[in-house]
Amino acid sequence: MAQQAAAVEPLIAGFWEQARAQTRHASHAFWTRMAQDGLLPASCDVDALADTASVLVAAETYLLTTRLHGWTPAQYEAWLLRTTTALAGLSPSPTAPTPTPHPG
């Protein structure tokens, strides 16, 4: 709703943009710290990882994927875990859940 309102309401648009910038900043801080702590492969492009991850965790992505695939929040979480793990070049956890496709 906020995204749609931002198109016609400058105040909401400003807050929306601020939230997107904070999401991007948090993603960069998280993945940079992961790299500094030696938890990512040395070959990992941290900036590209952080930029991509910030799109994956965005509210818009959550809404799109849960509606498109009919996923529950738990299924989205499982997809996000598997996707970011693969993106970072890490081995997936053998216990990481896999989202099940939506029937029909």
Image: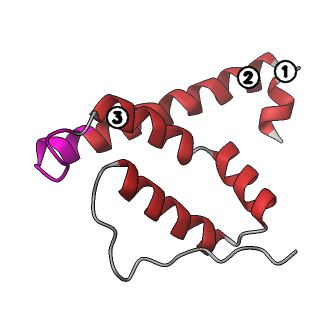
- Label 3, secondary structure: give it: helix
Which quadrant holds residue 45? top left
Image quarter hosting the N terminus: top right
Lower sequence index among marks 1 and 3: 1
The mark found on residue 62 in the picture is none
Most foreground residue, 23 or 55: 55
Going by the numbered disc 2, the residue's amino acid type is: Ala
- Residue sitting farthest toward the bottom: 95
Q: Where is residue 34 in the image (x, y as percent from the top left)?
A: 21, 47
Which quadrant holds residue 12? top right
Mark 2 touching mark 3, by CB under 8 A? no
Residue 58 lies left or right of residue 93; in this view the side is right
Q: Position of residue 14 (x, y in %)?
A: 67, 20
Mark 2 Cα-neighbour bin, 10 Å: few <14, some 14–19, many ≥20: some
Q: What residue is rendered at 62% in x and 72% in y?
A: 75
Tally of numbered tags: 3
Most foreground residue, 58 or 1: 58
Cα distance between the residues tagged 1 and 2: 6 Å
The mark found on residue 13 in the picture is 2
Q: Where is residue 91 in the image (x, y as percent from the top left)?
A: 28, 65
Which residue does the numbered mark 3 point to in the structure image? 28
